[in-house]
Image: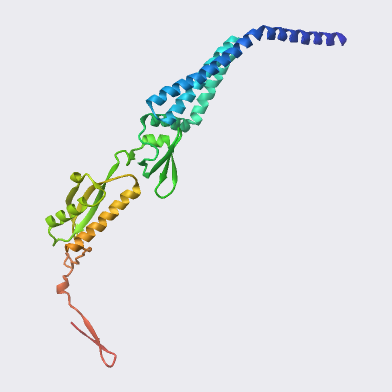
Amino acid sequence: MEIKLDNALTVITNKLSSWLEALIDLIPNMVLSLIILVLFIFLAKMGGKLFDKIFRKTSTNEVLRNLFSTILYYTIIGFGLFIILGVLGLEKALTSALAGVGIIGLALGFAFQDIAANFVSGIILAFRRPFQVGEVVEIKDIMGRIQRTNLRVTVVETFQGQEVYIPNKDVLQSSIYNYSILGKRRVDLAVGISYGDDLQKVENLVSDAISNMEGVIDQDNMIFDYYEFGSSSINFYIRFWVKYPDQPGFLSMRHKAVKLIKKTFDENNITIPFPIRTLDFGIKGGQKLSEMPISITRGSENGESNGES
């Protein structure tokens, strides 16, 4: 029993001694690895600052700058870690780690493909820049002002007071209507007048009134066009341009135009007719109203009634 115990102690002692010798042999490599780590951390910081300085001279896109600065920093750090593993003689561990990362990455790619798609879409939007923060846009039938955007979602504040979070993938795949980029917007206003009014007179009155309205721009591009013989009116469009700082300003200009046209018509005896319906009883199989007998019922004194036609 004592012999077996002595043998076990000998094995343990020899193992510890071999580990200690290996540790002593690794001390120079560990010191070198520490120096390499400090060096690459310094390089990563300097590289990030240099990239940030260069990028600021070429673009003001903060999202894109932060993204590439972070990617550059961790790329340099990762490269340094690979070198350190090689210095420490852990190539096999490095190979196993890379294989494990590949398998895990493949599994996560399937599980989080939507997140990855939004991330990539966010990068593309950061490059393309179809809108800026504060601009009025319409995306997927959602109209509002851009509040912020990141690498996952675009946040739009609607004019009804809600914040809508639109995934970047949907933003990239949808039509984007930017109402602020040109700084102006056209108002298309439909109006109807009676068949008895002078069409040329109406055109002149409306065109002059809208042209002289405060806030209207590009008067030469204003369009007046009759487009329809309606059931009770001749209908036309007046299309004019206004400055577009925001949606309330657009609605205010349309509101003023309606009031101005109504006032102009009242002052010049122009009629905006009510809908008129004509009833015709002469359809095939029926009877004309003029040919229908009219029955009048009168009450007699004794409560009996006689019909006369």
Q: Residue at x 46, y 28 (%)?
A: 66
Q: Residue at x 45, y 34 (%)?
A: 150
Image coordinates of residue 68 in percent, x first then y, are 45, 25
Image quadrant holding the N terminus, namely: top right
In this rendering, does residue 271 appear at all? no
Q: Residue at x 32, y 49 (%)?
A: 249
Image coordinates of residue 126 in percent, x first then y, are 40, 30
Image coordinates of residue 238 in percent, x first then y, are 21, 51
Between 305 and 179, the one lying in front of the other is 179
Q: Is residue 226 above or below residue 52?
A: below
Task: Using the rendered view, name the quadrant where residue 37 is placed.
Answer: top right
Q: Is residue 258 left or right of residue 11?
A: left
Q: Is residue 232 above or below residue 183?
A: below
Q: Is residue 83 left or right of residue 296?
A: right
Outermost right residue: 2
Task: Using the rendered view, name the quadrant where residue 142 is placed.
Answer: top left
Q: Residue at x 45, y 20 (%)?
A: 50
In this rendering, does residue 255 appear at all? yes
Q: Is residue 157 above or below residue 236?
A: above
Task: Using the rendered view, name the quadrant where residue 99 is placed.
Answer: top right
